[in-house]
Image (spheres, helix red, strand yellow):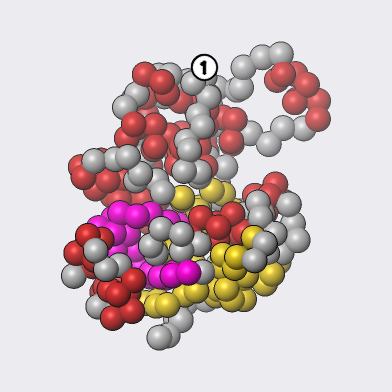
């Protein structure tokens, strides 16, 4: 197996995570190159979300992370975000009393101490170029003044992605963005994620929807029991015997 040929924007070397006696990640190496959409797949419990949690600073780990050549290891989550790392969560957690545009404003705005005090007594500022770009890329402009609670699940998922994108990250980490979506919604999500990458934001995508991940990724890593068992272009991963074995059952049909 060969590593990605391009120079990495995001790099992980020797990443391991333990929860008591359980090793959730075991010496994981992974790269995301500029302009790439990289998929991270694996059976339930393989360690995919744990990897994103470690990368974004929400669980302690051994090993190293870098973004753009800058070391992330040891930085708190907000420090990593300032260097260009953003993420979504499996639980969307939108502010249902704010409009879609205001939800994005919360993520896009980096307030000073005094503006924070001022904004405690008022609503978030209405818009910015970063917010409008995120809405455009994800085809959400028509929903800008809507309340998230009034929208279907597919649109709510996109708002979560747009909110992370409004922070103008260099790398966007998506944790199960297609969960709960039907086939058509998942396909539309895939088109929009490709548009995000084509407009300059690299993506690390974790999802159980094999059709989505293998259909839109430039490069794919496969985790099983915390270890990388395969990596390469989607067509190479799809035919890998270890990957097929790991997905024995209904999910294996999506690999063949």
Q: Residue at x 51, y 69 (%)?
A: 226
Does the magenta run of residues contain 202? yes
**Residue 211 sits in quarter:** bottom left
Count the marks: 1
Left or right of 76? Residue 9 is left
Can residue 69 be seen?
A: no
**Residue 120 sits in quarter:** top right
> What quarter of the picture does the C terminus occupy?
bottom left
Q: Position of residue 251 (x, y in %)?
A: 25, 61
In the figure, 31 relative to 106: above or below? below
In the figure, 162 relative to 1: above or below? above
> What quarter of the picture does the N terminus occupy?
bottom left
Q: Position of residue 15 (x, y in %)?
A: 62, 71
Left or right of 63? Residue 98 is left
Tell me the SS state at disc 1. Answer: loop
* Residue 237 vs residue 45, the one in the foreground: 45
Q: Which residue is mark 1?
A: 97
Does the magenta run of residues contain 101? no
Which portion, as a residue range, is magenta?
200-225
Left or right of 172? Residue 79 is right
In the figure, 209 relative to 238: above or below? above
Q: Residue at x 38, y 62 (%)?
A: 43
Q: Residue furthest top?
A: 121
Q: Position of residue 236 (x, y in %)?
A: 29, 78
* Residue 22 vs residue 91, the one in the foreground: 22
Q: Residue at x 34, y 24 (%)?
A: 151
Left or right of 214? Residue 166 is right
In the figure, 171 relative to 227: above or below? above
Q: Residue at x 20, y 42 (%)?
A: 184
Q: Position of residue 137 (x, y in %)?
A: 38, 42
């Amino acid at each position: 197996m060969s590593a990605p040929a391009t120079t990495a924007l995001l790099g992980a070397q020797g990443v391991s995570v333990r929860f008591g006696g359980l090793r959730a990640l075991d010496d994981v190496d992974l790269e995301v190159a500029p302009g790439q959409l990289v998929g991270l797949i694996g059976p339930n419990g393989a360690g995919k979300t744990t990897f994103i949690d470690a990368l974004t600073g929400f669980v302690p780990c051994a090993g190293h992370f870098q973004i753009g050549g800058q070391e992330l290891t040891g930085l708190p989550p907000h420090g990593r975000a300032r260097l260009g790392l953003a993420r979504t969560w499996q639980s969307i957690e939108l502010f249902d009393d704010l409009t879609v545009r205001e939800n994005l404003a919360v993520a896009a705005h980096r307030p000073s101490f005094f503006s924070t005090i001022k904004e405690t007594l008022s609503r978030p500022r209405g818009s910015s170029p970063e917010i409008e770009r995120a809405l455009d890329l994800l085809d959400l402009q028509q929903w800008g003044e809507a309340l998230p609670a009034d929208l279907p699940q597919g649109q709510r998922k996109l708002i979560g992605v747009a909110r992370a994108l409004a922070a103008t990250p260099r790398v966007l980490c998506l944790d199960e963005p297609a969960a709960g979506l039907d086939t058509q919604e998942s396909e539309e999500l895939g088109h929009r994620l490709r548009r995000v990458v084509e407009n300059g934001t690299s993506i690390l995508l974790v999802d159980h929807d094999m059709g989505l991940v293998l259909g839109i990724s430039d490069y794919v890593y496969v985790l099983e029991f915390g270890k990388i068992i395969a990596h390469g272009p989607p067509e190479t991963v799809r035919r890998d015997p270890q990957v097929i074995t790991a997905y024995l059952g209904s999910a294996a049909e999506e690999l063949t």
